[in-house]
Image (cartoon, rainbow, N blue to C red):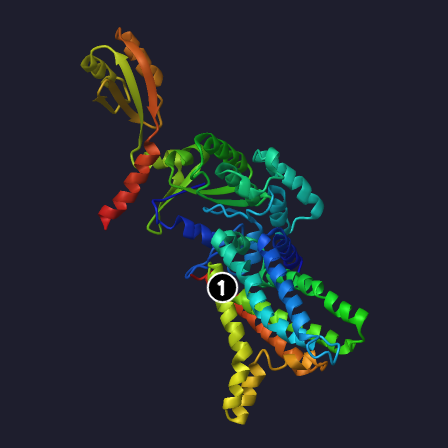
Amino acid sequence: MGFLGPNAAGKTTTMRILTGFLAPTRGEAWVADYSLQNNSLEARQHIGYFAESVPLYTDMTVRTYLDFWAKLRGLDNDRIETRIDDVVDLCHLEEYVDVYIGKLSKGFRQRVGIAQAIIHEPEVLIMDEPTVGIDPIQVSMTRQIIKELGKDRTVLLSTHILPEVSMTCERVIIIHEGKIVAEDSIDNLSSLVGGSRRIRLEVKGPPDDVARSLRRIKGVSKVNLQGEYHIVEYPVNQDLRSKITETVVGGGWTLLSMEALTMSLEDVFLKLTTEEETER
Amino acid sequence: MKNTLTIAKKELKSYIASPMAYIVACIFLALAGVFFSIFSPSTYLETSLSGFLSNISLVLLLLAAVLTMRLIAEERKLGTLELLLTAPVRDSELIMGKFLGSLGMLSIMLILTFYYPILLVIFGDPDIGPIITGYLGIFLLGCTCLSVGIFASTLSSNQIVSAVVAGGILFALWFIGQAATFLPEALGDIINYFSLSYYFPDFVTGIIDTRGIVYYLSITLLFLFLAIRSIENSRWS
């Protein structure tokens, strides 16, 4: 589950309420069938939390740090050992288990933070911007881990990086100024706001002729010329790429490149958060 | 209870791993040595620790403020408080764990001063009773000071602020008894009952006054309770 919103939309606050760090001034929060107001301890038992600032004790080694949290989460001593091995394995921290956290680089600290959040195998994992501030290779590694984790539990991922959501999440909630403005699967959301797939073509041939024949393909809603490129748009529920290729080749031109522009979620996001403003 | 011990153990370990605790312990022991050599034999009339113990009590106020200043303030600054408060740990378990951890460290330091009474026993014939009650008094006073320090530490994310607030509260409570001499007797008595220093001399002279024990324990519990409330309060801001 992706949790999207512009800065100061209330993402972190919502997550802090869900984890029991903050108390709601109104209403009630429920996680895994436990009320955070009445059964706070039980509810917290089922939650793993990766906080935005990646808080860690720098004077501990990775192993003692994980051991500390596992104990506080009420794990048995013999299970702690195996769980530490498991999460260290999953987060690729094998070489660093006995290194002091203060000596680790940002990316590794991030992974220690994730390891901490999943040490007790929580049903619900709440992650606040887990990929901010680390290098691209580590980002993709972290996303891989998140995807892996999402297979058998609920992951609530807050972010404002849109491709991250389309890569790791099945469903999205978009909030704006504290209110939910949309909640659906990614594909549905795109079509909801008239989203379309866009393909960027590089074709060797007279641009106008190419555009004209591309427009004749059934299903294509729009063809634009952008410099040397043709931007072809069509509804998300169709895949016209092979037809486009046939048309270009059939016209006697050469297709140099074809690239999908996955901007749809960004469009949805912008549309939803700005629509709200114009309405008011 | 298990959580309390886990946190206490972690705190004690991080004291032992940090240079700060060694510096504090070192200075404490050096001062203890100074007090022992200056105050104990100055009269050479008796082999007792009374001069040593009553002076070390003032150092204890500062020591407690310094030992406890990081306990919550640092967690707040690092953001680890967010994790602690979202773990299935009661606020009371958290505060008690911190308290026991710092009490462990204080106890280690006090135990290290045991060689002064041992010296007295070897080279003289001291009255053991007042030494034991004196240490009991120091221990109870230590509990109170640590609880005040922990409460002060919950108030801010700045360790210096915590230490200054703790020191302020402790010294105010210590010297408030002095004001009693200027006040009408009834009011003076009431103020004396609140003073940290009022019951302490009894312990040093070998008297175990239950009022003293009750006083130190109830002030300790009061500030631990305030610390728990203060943590709870941060969930609403």
Q: Is residue B111 above or below residue A123?
A: below
Q: Say which amino acid is labelled 1.
A: Ser
Side of B13 relative to B122 (left or right): left
| Position of the N terminus of chain B by quadrant | bottom right
Q: Is residue B98 above or below residue B221?
A: above
Question: The residue tagged with tag 1: helix, strand or loop?
Answer: helix
Does residue A249 appear anywhere in the picture?
yes
Q: Nearer the viewer, residue A50 or B104?
A: B104
| Residue at x 62%, y 79% (from the top left corner) | B215
Query: What is the chain letter for disc 1?
Result: B
| Residue at x 52%, y 34% (from the top left corner) | A145
All told, the count of numbered labels is: 1
Q: Nearer the viewer, residue A164 or B9?
A: B9
Residue A147 place in picture, x, y as percent: 50, 34
To which residue does mark 1 refer?
B162
Q: Nearer the viewer, residue B101 or A16?
A: B101
| Position of the C terminus of chain B by quadrant | bottom left
Q: Is residue B197 above or below residue A40?
A: below
Q: Is residue B212 above or below residue B5?
A: below
Residue B203 place in picture, x, y as percent: 69, 79
Indicate the quadrant where residue A228 lies: top left
| Residue at x 53%, y 34% (from the top left corner) | A148
Does residue A240 appear anywhere in the picture?
no
- Residue sitting at the far top: A252
Residue A75 place in picture, x, y as percent: 66, 48
Residue A233 place in picture, x, y as percent: 28, 25
Side of B202 relative to A112 (left or right): right
